[in-house]
């Protein structure tokens, strides 16, 4: 499950190598297409957040994929989601996935809950930045399968950006954006569309990167939007020639204060500020 952590072609090669090395399947569909590696996956938190309720999300998934599907149960409350999943899919529910919190404790709690509900054949799948040490620590837990990502497709000495995609807004029935947020205990989200701007002084020197919820401040000549549209209504609108991208980078770098080139370890070139919703 490490495709998002490496180059797209390296992800395919990593999936092939992992399958040769003993992994049962991959979430990389391209590897399945090219090499015939078995493909599997579960739904994402964004899928749950796109629906009005967790019940709606689970119902849609079961109706589309059948009772043997794997439901992601830690978007909100794990025990409530497990009960809901069994209610919707019945005791033939294929599996549930845990992706946050104390996985050892949660696995035991979820196994006990599933057995009590009569879903004794429902499997437990665990993900969340796993490596060989984390898996060894879970050996005593009632876990049936593991989803491994970053530690599999990157070398231990290769730095990776610990970034994840989180849906923060969706269109409601009236065509308006409404805020959504993940509420799990250890990985909460902040709902609402964000804006990101670079704020400069009157001489064109950048002073701060500003993040906020809602639309950016209006009528401020010292703010430059940092978010640019890449795809609009299914059409690519953000493609630009290589030289244009290079020049844009140089213009942005020229805005930085002279202190930015000191490259102090651990210090940002300019500070980040957070604004309240407007």
Image (cartoon, rainbow, N blue to C red):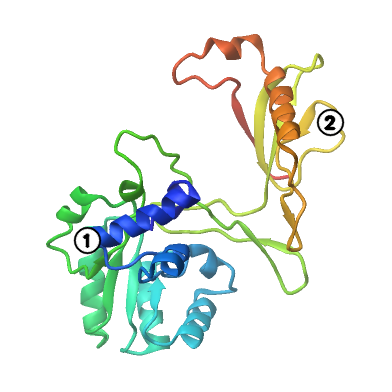
Q: Residue at x 42, y 68 (%)?
A: 32
Q: Residue at x 22, y 62 (%)?
A: 22
Q: Position of residue 77 (x, y in %)?
A: 40, 67
Residue 34 horizontal side relative to residue 117, left or right: right
**Pointer 1 or 2: first along the chain:** 1
**Residue 185 location, quadrant:** bottom left
Q: Is residue 226 above or below residue 185?
A: above
Q: Position of residue 148 (x, y in %)?
A: 31, 56
* Residue that extends furthest to the right in the rendered view of this protein: 219
Disc 1: which residue:
105
Q: Is residue 84 above or below residue 47?
A: below
Give the secondary structure at mark 2: loop
Q: Which mark is residue 154?
A: none
Q: Is residue 269 above or below residue 6?
A: above
Instruction: Name the image quarter holding the C terminus.
Output: top right
Q: Position of residue 99 (x, y in %)?
A: 36, 60
Q: Residue at x 39, y 80 (%)?
A: 69
How far apart are the alpha carbons under marks 1 and 2? 51 Å
Q: Residue at x 59, y 68 (%)?
A: 50
**Residue 94 location, quadrant:** bottom left
Q: Which residue is at the front of the view, 40 or 47? A: 40
Give the secondary structure at mark 1: helix
Q: Can residue 2 be spotted in the picture?
A: no
Q: Position of residue 39 (x, y in %)?
A: 39, 70
Q: Can residue 247 be spotted in the picture?
A: yes
For the residues bearing labels 1 and 2, Cβ distance under 8 angstroms? no
For disc 2, the neighbor class at 10 Å (few under 14, some 14 to 19, many from 20) is: few
Disc 2: which residue:
220
Residue 131 horizontal side relative to residue 196, left or right: left
For disc 1, the neighbor class at 10 Å (few under 14, some 14 to 19, many from 20) is: few
Q: Which residue is at the front of the view, 252 or 29? A: 29
């Amino acid at each position: 499950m490490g495709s998002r952590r490496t180059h797209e072609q390296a992800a395919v090669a990593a999936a092939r190598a992992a399958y040769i090395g003993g992994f049962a399947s991959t979430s990389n569909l391209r590897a399945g297409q090219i090499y015939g590696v078995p493909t599997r996956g579960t739904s994402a938190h964004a899928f749950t957040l796109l629906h009005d309720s967790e019940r709606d999300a689970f119902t849609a998934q079961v109706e589309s994929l059948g009772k043997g599907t794997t439901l992601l149960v830690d978007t909100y409350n794990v025990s409530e989601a497990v009960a809901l999943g069994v209610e919707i899919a019945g005791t033939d529910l294929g599996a549930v996935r845990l992706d946050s919190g104390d996985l050892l404790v949660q696995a035991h709690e979820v196994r006990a809950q599933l057995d009590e509900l009569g879903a004794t054949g429902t499997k437990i799948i665990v993900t969340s930045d796993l490596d060989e040490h984390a898996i060894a620590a879970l050996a005593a837990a009632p876990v049936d399968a593991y989803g491994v990502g970053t530690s599999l497709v990157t070398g231990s000495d290769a730095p990776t950006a610990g970034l994840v995609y989180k849906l923060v807004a969706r269109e409601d029935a009236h065509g308006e954006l409404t805020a959504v947020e993940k509420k799990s205990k250890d990985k909460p989200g902040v709902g609402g569309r964000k804006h990101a701007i670079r704020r400069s002084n009157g001489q064109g020197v950048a002073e701060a990167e500003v993040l906020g919820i809602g639309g950016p401040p209006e009528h401020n000549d010292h703010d430059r939007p940092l978010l640019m549209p890449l795809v609009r209504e299914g059409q690519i609108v953000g493609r630009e020639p290589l030289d244009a991208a290079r020049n844009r980078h140089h213009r942005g770098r020229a805005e930085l204060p002279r202190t930015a080139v000191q490259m102090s370890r651990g210090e940002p070139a300019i500070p980040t500020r957070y604004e309240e919703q407007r």
